[in-house]
Image (tube, rainbow, N blue to C red):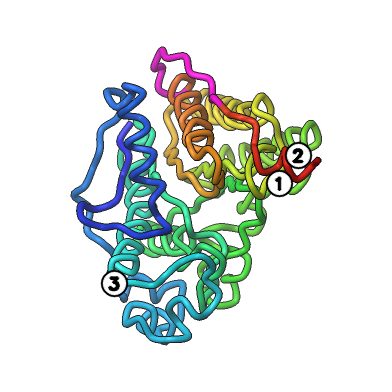
Amino acid sequence: MCPASLGEGSESSSPLKPRLLLEYLDQMQLMDYFEIDHTFPPFTNQDFYVAHTQEYVDGFFQGRLPHSNGQGLLGIDWSPAYADSTRYTNASMYHAILGSIKNPSRIYLSPTSGFHHAVPEHGALFCAFSGQVIAALKIYEELGLIGAFIDLDGHFGNSIEDSRYFAPNLNKAIPVGCNINILTEHNEYLQDLQIRMLLLQERFLTGQLHYLVFCHGADSHEEDDIGHQLNTEEWMECAHIFARTVQQIESSLGRPIPVSLALFGGYREDDYNSVLSLHTGSLLHILKHLSRIDIEYWPAVSKNVRKSADKK
């Protein structure tokens, strides 16, 4: 596995998860299973223009209101360091997908989040730029390849759908129906995901899709501060459904297919290690089944103190 990560020296209050996850993997003595790439270049303003207005992009990087922290971004204090980090996190997703296309025998990870609520004119919530939109457009325009995003964050990833009017090629880069979000709960959630994955499998086998990106947000877990949809067993079953679908596609085609992973949401003020443990569990489960790495790991998720108190 070769995760594309943050460039050295980048930092911010929002995209801390990449660093925290890598530190967690190191603490759990799991880093021997990974190869880290710090060599990819950060995005320039021009790269962001494919999915965002020039006014917003330039205003954001110059720290101008309302384009910095005054327009749609919550809980983020704009700073040059934060702005610089978005150049790396967005580039990370693109280079992870590109790496999987060039070397489909390996699984690539962009250990990033903070993309799927941004829209062409501004950021939203914790998302400054729509990294998956940028990556998909660049890959389509450079290579003519088409992808699907399985976005299992606890909140609907609107940036793809809300960017279709702005970037006409997005309908070709990520066809309608290939931005997968599940809004149901428990068994119904798993059934919905299985159906969606079967539909993607059919598209892949008929040559309509060329790569898959799995974004397993931890905020769809019931112990998350702002999530509720799945318990741990169900949440891990989502990773299994994804891995099994990839195995079926590869068996039918007789070759590996490009697969990359990203993190997306996850919020626990009382125990952030529960978020990191969920991401680690999903990641290692996919590695076990797709890369034949023999390792057993089950997420350690504590009861949410805040949620328990609110119920009393």
Residue beneath disc 1: 182
Pointer 2 or 3: first along the chain = 3
Side of 127 where 177 appears, left or right:
right
Question: Is residue 274 shown above or below 29?
Answer: below
Q: Which is nearer the eye, 211 or 77?
A: 77
Give the distance between the C-alpha atoms of the residues marked 3 and 1, in whole angstroms: 35 Å
Give the distance between the C-alpha atoms of the residues marked 2 and 3, in whole angstroms: 42 Å
Give the class, few, some or many, for how many residues have Cα within 10 Å of label 2's Cα (few <14, many ≥20).
some
Question: Which of the 4 image quarters holds residue 302?
Answer: top right
Q: Secondary structure at mark 2?
A: helix
Q: Which is nearer the eye, 61 or 23?
A: 23
Residue beneath disc 3: 80
Q: Which is nearer the eye, 100 or 153?
A: 153
Question: Is residue 48 shown above or below 200?
Answer: below
Q: Residue at x 63, y 42 (%)?
A: 224
Side of 228 where 214 appears, left or right:
left
Residue beneath disc 2: 192
